[in-house]
Image: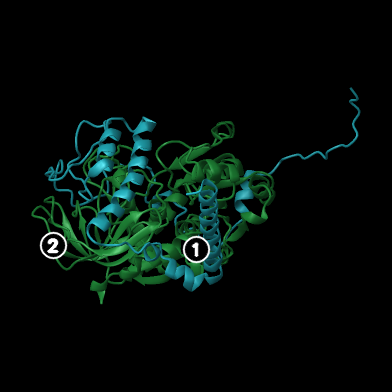
Chain colours: A green, B cyan
Amino acid sequence: MLAMNYRGPYRVRAVQKAEPEIEHPGDAIVRVTRSCICGSDLHLYHGLVPDTRVGMTFGHEFTGIVEQVGPSVQNLKKGDHVLVPFNIFCGSCYFCQKELYSNCHNTNPSATAVGGIFGYSHTTGGYDGGQAEYVRVPMADVGPTVIPADIDVDDAVLLTDAYPTGYQAAEMGGIEQGDTVVVFGAGPVGLFAAKSAWLLGAGRVIVVDHLEYRLEFAQRFAQCEIINFKEVADMAIHIKKMTDWLGADVCIDAVGCEAAGNFAQSLTGLKLKLQAGSATVLHWAINSVRKGGTVSIVGVYGPTFNAVPIGNAINKGLTLRMNQASVKRHLPRLIEHIQAGRIKPSEVITHRFPLEEIADAYHVFSSKLDNCIKPVLIPPTVH
Amino acid sequence: MDTRVTEKSPTYIENTDPVQRQKAHHREDLPGWGADVDPANRPAVPKERTPPRLPNVHWDQPEAQEAHVRVFHSTERPGLTPVFGTSTPPSGLSGRMRELAFRFSENDVRHWLILLAADRVNVGEGLLDDLAHGHVPNIFAEMGWRSEWRYNRAGFIKKALVAGAVVGTAVYLMRQRRKREGI
C-alpha cells in the first residue's frame, strides 16, 4: 500500500509498504478515505518530538471504511464508514472510567503522561497513522464512530481531532455568558476554539496571530476581533487596553511549542533546544488574562520543561486547564451542532493533495504557502 | 536626594461592575450563539464523569497483545500495556541508544535527551539504508521544494542564491587554504 514515510526533519516521502494486519483481537483494519495533516504533525515534521523514528507513518486525523475486524470486535462491521478519534483508548482503565480517554493507561507503553495516539512517534505508543491507504485501528469497539448519513466526510474528518480540540479548549476555559475570550493562534484549532467560544456564550472573541491571511480568514469564519502581534509592542498592555484594563476572562493557547513573537523564547526553545519549545503564547496568556481568570492550553509542548511566568499565575489566582482532547466525549454534541447548521468544520479546508504528493503537502502547510489553512490528503484507493 | 514631584501620573480608579460587564455583550446575531451556555449541554462538564458515557465496552480488562517486535516501556510502569504499536522497531545504533534512554524514567531529562539524539542518529541510518538498497534519496523532492518553487518563487530563488553563496564561499576559502599550504 502507499503510505507517508518520515525520513528526518523536514523530509517525508510516499512509499509502498506492507498493509497492516490484525495484531490484537480488538483491532480493525480501515481503508482510509480522508486524512489530514494536523498542526501538531508539524512538531514531528520539524523533529521536535522525542522518539520519532525514521520509517514511521504519521497521521492522527482520518476517516475510513472498515475492511476487516478482529475476533473480539462486536460493534463494528466490514463496510462501516467511520471517523476515528486520534486517541487510542481502552474504555476500561481508571482514566477511561472517568472519561479521560486521552489519558488512557492501557494503550501507550512508552510514556505514562499520555495515552496512545495514531502516528505520533513512539512517545505516544508507536502506532502507524492514517496518512496511508490502510491503517490498523486498535480497540475498534470504542474508538471509531460510524459517520451519520447526513454528515459529509470532509466535516467528519475534522471531528477526529481539530474541532473537538478547539471545542475542548473553549470548554476548559469555563466560559460564562458575556466573557471576553482571547484565542492565541489562527490555525484550525484556534479557529474552532473561537467558533466554540460563541457556542458557549462568549461576549467578545479576539484571535491573535501574525499571518495576515489567517487573521482575515478568522474574521470571516469566526466573526471575531483580530490582533496581529507583529503590530503590537506589548501583548499584555494591548489586551488590557481592549478590556477596560482588566484583562481577558479566558485566554486559550492554540499554538504550542513553535510560537513566534519572542526572540529569547525562540532562541532558547527552538534554536538551542534549552527548553521544550518556545513558550511565548503561554507567557502572553498568563500575563494577558484577568486576575481570577482561566488559561486553557491545547497547544502541544514537549515533555521536558518550559520557561513560563508561573509566579504571575499564582499571584493572579488563575485557573490553568489543559489536556489533549478526549474526542469521543465531544462527538455526540458536535454532530448535533453540524446537523443543526451551527457549525461547518469543512469550511477551513483550503487544500487537497493526493497522498502521492505528501512532501509538497507538508511543505505547503509548514511554510504557510498559498494561504494554506488546512490540507487534506486523498489516498489513491478513494478513486 | 530631590523628592519633589515633577510629573504627576493621573489617578486611575477601577470600579467596573462585574454583573453589568457580563451583560454588556450579547451576540444573538451569530448562529448558535449561547447554545452551550448551560453546563448540561457541555460534554466535559464535569471534567471527570464516572461511569463514562461509553457503550460497547464488553470487557473488564483488554486482552493482551503478543509482542513480536521489541517494544520498550517506561520505567514508570511495571510492564507493557495490553495494546501497543509495532511501527519501526528499534534497530542499529539508534536502537541501542533508545534502549539506554528507556533505563531512565520520564522524570529524568536524560531519557528525553538521549531519545532526541537517537532520532538524529536514526536520520543518518535512514540515508545509509537507502543507499544500501540502491536508492539515492531525492532530498529536494522529500523536502517539498517543488511547492516552494510553485508558490514562493522569489523566496526559492533567494534561498538558492544564499545557499549558493555560502557553498561558493566555503569552496573558495578551502581552495585558498590548500594553495597556502601547497597541497
Identify the amino acid type marked 2.
Gln
Tell me the residue that label 1 is attached to.
Answer: A368
Residue drawn at 52 percent across, 46 percent down: B181
Tag of residue B44? none
Above or below residue B84? Residue A308 is above
Identify the amino acid type marked 1.
Lys
Q: Position of residue A88 (x, y in %)?
A: 26, 50
Above or below residue A187? Residue A344 is below
* Residue A64 relative to residue B13: left or right: left
* Residue A285 relative to residue A359: left or right: right
Instruction: Please determine if labels 2 and 1 lie on a single subunit.
Output: yes
Tell me the residue that label 2 is attached to.
Answer: A68
Q: Position of residue A10 (x, y in %)?
A: 40, 56
> Cα distance, mark 2 to mark 1?
38 Å
Q: Position of residue A141 (x, y in %)?
A: 18, 54
Q: Position of residue A362 (x, y in %)?
A: 40, 62
Circle 1 residues within 10 Å: few <14, some 14–19, many ≥20? some
* Local secondary structure at mark 1: loop
* Residue A225 relative to residue B96: left or right: right
| Residue sitting nearer the eye, A24 or A261 | A261
Residue A316, quarter of picture:
top right
| Residue sitting nearer the eye, A243 or A363 | A363
**Chain of the residue where label 2 is placed in the rendered structure:** A
Residue A104, quarter of picture:
top left
* Local secondary structure at mark 2: strand
| Residue sitting nearer the eye, A36 or B12 | A36
For the C terminus of chain A, which image quadrant? Answer: bottom left
Residue drawn at 37 percent across, 58 percent down: A11
For marks 2 and 1, the one nearer the N-term is 2
